Image (tube, helix red, strand yellow):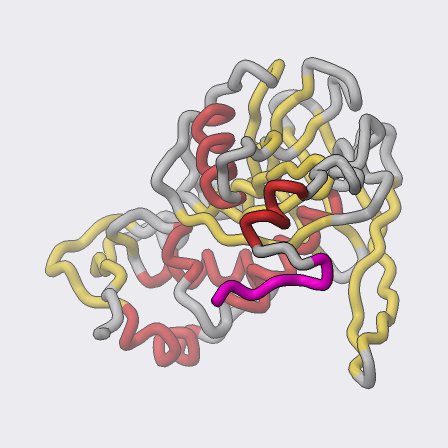
Amino acid sequence: MEKRNSRGQTEEEFLRAYDPTKYEKPSVSVDLLVMGIDKSYDSLKILLIKRREHPFIDCWALPGGFIGIDESGYRAAGRELEEETGLKGIYLEQIYTFTQPKRDPRMRVIDIAYLALIPVVPARAGDDAKDARWFNVSFGSDALRVYNGEIGVSMEYALSRKIFHNGVVKYTNYVPACRTEERLAFDHVEVLLEGLMNLRRKVEYTDMAFNLVPETFTLPDLQRVYELILGKEVYKANFRDKIYEKVEETGEKGKSITGKKMSQLYRYKFPEP
């Protein structure tokens, strides 16, 4: 026997009579923090696009767009990534959902941000962008800098720490204040900070960092990737103990980018099920 609600309706009758215009509907978008490593292993790099339309015309922003009515967030993120950059089949992970009511001046837009990790590759601008460039990122305890020396663009933010409460738990987060004329569009500096902090936390207990090196790599280069993410030097012995069971030798040697000498090449070892 079918269950009926207080009005005596079956579920089929309820859905047929339901008015979907009863509540206001926000739009939902995805933004992509696409991150790689500088070819000299000196810096983390992120992909930014230059907006060709209002709002924030001519400002640098993270690639992204609106989710189609029949798309999941993950699928939309992959589609936008390919449209904006030509990249596909790479590591994607959700960072956070950004819901501030006035984050987009056009209308109410809820944004799902994704982190994409790749070894640095050339990028092409898509139809919605004037330009697409890799920017270096410097993330310290009191400042965040995003810059590209080739085109002379530098965006700098002072970072202050603020304590937030969640029940009995207290946690510290960064509050950015721009100190340059150029700044990232929308709330994309918050997306960048959240992505950097998530990556810094998770690299300690996941294998995410292996998405930032080629298929074969030297241990000095892999260690440098960890150091760039963590923002500090890592002791060689401790590092090798940490990743010992995650890598395997290829039997070949290659020139280390960071060490400038021939070293044993390794590959990521998939964990046993």
Residue shown at 51%/63% (left/top)?
A: 2
Residue bounds of the magenta highlight: 1-7
Q: Where is residue 179 in the image (x, y as percent from the top left)?
A: 88, 40
Q: Residue furthest left?
A: 251
Foreground of the two, 211 or 241? 211
Residue drawn at 59 percent across, 48 percent down: 13
Please indicate, yes or no, whether residue 185 appears anywhere in the rendered image.
Answer: yes
Q: Along the horizontal axis of the image, is 210 left or right of 84?
A: left
Task: List x then y, in percent, for residue 271.
Answer: 26, 71
Decide if residue 35 is in sight here: no
Asked if residue 186 lies left or right of residue 3, the reply is: right
Depth check: 66 or 23 in front? 23
Along the line of sight, which residue is nearer the eye, 108 or 236?
108
**Which residue sits at x=60%, y=18%?**
129
Q: Which residue lies furthest to the bottom in this view?
A: 168
Prevailing secondary structure class for the magenta stretch in the rendered image: loop
Residue 212 is a magenta residue? no
Q: Which residue is pictured at 86% across the width and 39% down the height?
A: 102
Q: In this view, does 171 lie to the left or right of 80?
A: right
Please state the horizontal and vertical placement of residue 207, each as a whole percent of the image. 40, 65
Q: Is residue 6 magenta?
A: yes
**Residue 52 drawn above or below residue 196:** above
The spot of residue 12 in percent (x, y) is 54, 49
Q: In which quarter of the image is the C terminus?
A: bottom left
Please give left or right for residue 250 compared with residue 111 in the image: left
The residue closer to the viewer here, 144 or 202, is 202
